[in-house]
Image (spheres, rainbow, N blue to C red):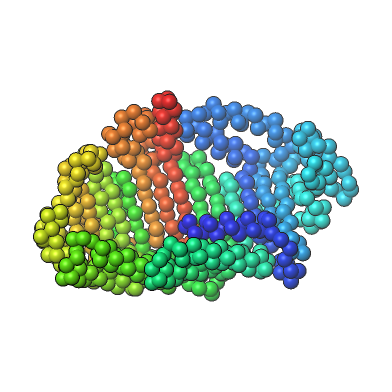
């Protein structure tokens, strides 16, 4: 997601500050490259009042609503506003439009700021500023404004330009990649490649080993190809923020649509209706749970393989430099264990199938964590772990390990008991003096758990997963802020967490953060969703910190 947003930001800034492009790249009239949508004044003011109340500052929201009345005289508060950007003879032509009931009254209200408007005929008004001149034209209940009069000659209906953005979001931005001149898109790719080459020169100095440097360069070029693909094969990007007062939440959407028939579109198609065998990680009473399901693209597989190759090189070096492994036989055995583990990972990655999850429980002053997922060769992983235990049997620092402590639904479990140093007082409060680590292995899956009761947690996940495959979102992360802050407050008696708990009665049941990824036709939609209770908890926590200053 981060890479997509970076590409979105680069292209948006290039479109707004674009140099001259060739006339051959002109787009048909009113195919905006960029559209910015702002919901109606009525909705925006309602949103502000709701957010102010949610964070415990209702008077501030009421004040904003009251003061706004003096600035919206002549504005139609029931309609949305926006900005659209097209290209005229290769140059960007931004036009702003706001709904009006009385344009003259609106300009008169703000004349001390914008100056006196002059009627220059043809329904166009001119405002001369210190740095530039602005032209305004009223049409179909909207005032359109641009820095060149020619941009106002033929205007599209505002509703046509905005589409469904105002009904979906309080604030939305839509970028039509194919409406950006081809020369400009090529320029963006060229600039990114130049930055890449400059970065590679720095990496030459950082990676003294030639093999490591070569792998790192391949990794970087893989990333460059992905970014280039996002520019060349994307149809559009949409970024939208909605304040949903009826739903008592707010969310931020990032949507990408690929050009039909492209490699990017085929990659997006792999996200459609994914099925998971690990739905048990989605426990309702968890503080955090994560689920990942889908198919990896060729680029993603290649990148993962390169990362493993780099990890293999670095791990081999550490083994060779380890003072306790200078004996050739021990060193060979250690490398053998490492190779076996990486072989299992490589085999699973090459399949291109991704299915797994993780869960964190915080209850009874106890932290328990479990993760797991699909595996290609569980038997080899089990053999590798046993070889590791055998290799370290004479090492006094290796934690006590029990093999085959349990078997459940075909999963064999092993456990390690790791002593937590006395200096790690906070860790001892969470886990006790010793950390129990549980590894579960089946022919086609694995589980890893931390904390007392980790084995029982994995069994619970398995039981819930037995129901069978279910169609789910490709990505889903849930964070229950109330549970996390309640647990953290036990180690933070007077800080943020303790103060936040004052809002717990109001926040309970609405204290979650979700990150989800959902497929759509030729694309995907990623959403960051924050429930009302999270805002209340954060507000109280900040108040507590300020009170302690």
Residue at figure coordinates x 53%, y 57% from the top left: 6
Residue 419 placement (x, y as % from top left): 16, 47
Residue at figure coordinates x 47%, y 34% from the top left: 54
Residue 315 placement (x, y as % from top left): 29, 64
Side (left or right) of 270 relative to 460: right
Q: Nearer the viewer, residue 255 or 451?
A: 451
Q: Say which quarter of the image contains residue 198.
A: bottom right
Q: Is residue 447 visible?
A: yes
Q: Nearer the viewer, residue 359 or 320?
A: 320
Residue at figure coordinates x 70%, y 35% from the top left: 72
Q: Is residue 415 visible?
A: no
Q: Nearer the viewer, residue 187 or 195?
A: 195
Q: Quadrant of the C terminus?
A: top left
Residue 200 placement (x, y as % from top left): 50, 65
Residue at figure coordinates x 67%, y 68% from the top left: 183
Side (left or right) of 483 relative to 133: left
Q: Nearer the viewer, residue 183 or 70?
A: 183
How many numbered discs, if any?
0
Q: Using the image, determine if residue 314 lies above or below residue 244.
A: below
Residue 95 placement (x, y as % from top left): 73, 52
């Amino acid at each position: 997601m981060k890479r997509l947003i970076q590409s979105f930001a680069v292209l948006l800034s290039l479109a707004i500050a674009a140099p001259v492009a060739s006339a051959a790249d002109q787009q048909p009239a009113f195919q905006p490259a960029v559209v910015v949508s702002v919901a109606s004044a009525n909705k925006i003011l309602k949103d502000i009042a709701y957010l102010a109340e949610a964070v415990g500052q209702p008077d501030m929201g009421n004040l904003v609503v009251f003061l706004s009345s003096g600035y919206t005289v002549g504005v139609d508060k029931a309609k949305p506003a926006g900005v659209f950007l097209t290209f005229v003879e290769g140059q960007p032509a931004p036009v702003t439009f706001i709904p009006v009931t009385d344009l003259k009254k609106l300009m008169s209200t703000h004349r001390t700021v914008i100056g006196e408007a002059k009627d220059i005929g043809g329904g166009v008004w001119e405002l001369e500023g210190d740095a530039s001149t602005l032209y305004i034209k009223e049409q179909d209940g909207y005032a359109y404004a641009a820095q060149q009069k020619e941009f106002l000659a033929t205007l599209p209906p505002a509703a046509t330009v905005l589409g469904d953005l105002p009904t979906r979001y309080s604030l939305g931005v839509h970028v039509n990649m194919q409406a950006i001149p081809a020369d400009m898109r090529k320029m963006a790719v060229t600039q990114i490649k130049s930055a890449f080459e400059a970065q590679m020169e720095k990496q030459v100095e950082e990676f003294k080993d030639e093999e490591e440097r070569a792998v790192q360069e391949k990794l970087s070029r893989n990333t460059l190809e992905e970014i280039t693909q996002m520019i060349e094969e994307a149809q559009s990007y949409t970024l939208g923020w909605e304040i949903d007062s009826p739903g008592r939440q707010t969310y931020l959407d990032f949507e990408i649509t690929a050009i039909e028939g492209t490699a990017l579109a085929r990659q997006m198609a792999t996200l459609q209706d994914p099925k998971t065998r690990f739905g048990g990680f989605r426990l309702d009473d968890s503080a955090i749970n994560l689920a990942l399901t889908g198919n990896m693209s060729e680029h993603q597989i290649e990148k993962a393989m390169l990362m493993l190759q780099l990890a293999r090189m670095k791990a081999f070096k550490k083994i060779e430099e380890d003072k306790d492994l200078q004996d050739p036989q021990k060193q060979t055995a250690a490398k053998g264990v490492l190779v076996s583990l990486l072989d299992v990972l490589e085999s699973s990655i090459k399949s291109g199938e991704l299915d797994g999850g993780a869960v964190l429980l915080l209850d009874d002053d106890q932290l328990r964590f479990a993760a797991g997922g699909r595996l290609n060769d569980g038997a080899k992983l089990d053999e590798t772990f046993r070889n590791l235990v055998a290799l370290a049997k004479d090492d006094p620092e290796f934690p006590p390990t029990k093999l085959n402590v349990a078997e459940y639904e075909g999963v064999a479990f092993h456990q390690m008991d790791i002593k937590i140093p006395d200096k790690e007082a906070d860790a001892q409060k969470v886990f006790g003096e010793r950390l129990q680590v549980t590894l579960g292995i089946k022919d086609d899956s694995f589980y890893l758990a931390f904390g007392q009761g980790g084995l029982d947690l994995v069994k619970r996940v398995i039981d819930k997963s037995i129901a069978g495959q279910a169609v789910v979102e490709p990505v889903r992360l849930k964070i229950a802020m109330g549970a996390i802050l309640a647990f953290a407050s036990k180690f933070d008696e007077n800080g943020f967490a303790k103060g936040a708990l004052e809002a717990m009665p109001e926040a309970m049941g609405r204290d979650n953060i979700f990150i989800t990824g959902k497929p759509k036709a030729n694309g995907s939609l990623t959403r960051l969703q924050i429930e009302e209770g999270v805002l209340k908890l954060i507000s109280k926590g900040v108040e507590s910190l300020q009170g302690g200053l």
